[in-house]
Amino acid sequence: MLDLVTYDVFTETPFRGNPLAIVPRADGLGTDQMQTIARELNLSETIFVLPPDDPAHRARVRIFFPTAEIPFAGHPTVGCAIHLSGLAAAEGDATVDMTLEEVAGPVPVRVRKAGGRLSAEFVAPQLPTLSRKMEDAGLAARALGIGQDAIGNAVAPLPEVWQAGPSYIVLPVASVEALGRAGPAGHDWQAFTDRAGCFSAWLFAQDGEGGFRARMFSPAGGTPEDPATGSAVVTFAGLFAARGHCPPGETALRITQGVEMGRRSEIDAVLVTDATGLTQVRIAGAAVPVSEGRIRRP
């Protein structure tokens, strides 16, 4: 039997945020066994902890959707680092630095406990890059079951495909109200994602308070809707910076996701830019332990 713990990530409140399963001692498990466990648990992601290749690092980790392994993801990075820090049981305030070895590359993480709140901030292992611009606003609207006038906002007029390990269609929506009505719409959704060459779409709208509301759909990836998607926020950082919205220095963004699912999540991002463009993306959020138990080894 294998030990198993779960956390809710990008929240300070149990039963909100994005659930995460962690297998803290996954030594000896093969890829097929990990995939079987992830499919059985059926959360958006399950993370498996292994000994590091570099002894200076805290752990090597592998992250799985229910359907496939992925090279990097935000909420597993935050939740796993908080769990491995041991700060949940610590008295008083404390900080722990560590590096997690993910398939996409080493990920430096700083875990903090302050006033009882557990949070982690990591540096994205890859800077986001633009893969494709999507010029057909009508197809995007039909794919989401909303009007064409609901596509685009002050950040960007049309969707773009960005990747930072995982790839996402980063899709601007005109209002929070339109965002709430959006969702994958049958054959048009399939045609849209086929044209994009990407099966996951991260939608965002300005919230009127200086931040953003977001939703992420990836039915073909085994996640009909995701309550919080840190890796997608990294790709959003690429679009946001490329559109000229970041002065040199640091730009802080707050993204709220998962509201429509009843799992409100808060993701903080810091975009670092200079005269050459985006040089670093940091993602931060809180997490809370929810359950622990054991699972049979496949």
Image (cartoon, rainbow, N blue to C red):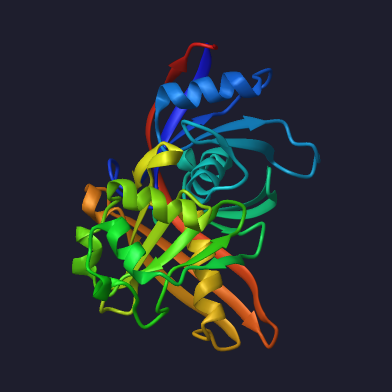
Residue occupying image coordinates x 72% and y 31%: 51
Residue occupying image coordinates x 48% and y 62%: 233
Coordinates of residue 279 in the picture (x, y in percent): 67, 74
Query: Viewed as shown, does residue 127 lie left or right of 112?
Result: right
Query: Viewed as shown, does residue 157 lie left or right of 63?
Result: left
Of residues 246 and 239, the one drawn nearer to the viewer in this rendering = 239
Coordinates of residue 155 in the picture (x, y in percent): 41, 80
Quarter occupied by the C terminus: top right
Give the answer, above or below, for where 198 lies relative to 160: above
Of residues 287 and 233, the one drawn nearer to the viewer in this rendering = 233
Coordinates of residue 35 in the picture (x, y in percent): 54, 25
Residue occupying image coordinates x 61% and y 24%: 25
Give the answer, above or below, for where 78 lies relative to 29: below
Coordinates of residue 195 in the picture (x, y in percent): 48, 56
Residue 11 visible in the picture:
no
Total numbered badges shown on the rendered structure? 0
Residue occupying image coordinates x 40% and y 79%: 157
Residue 122 visible in the picture:
yes
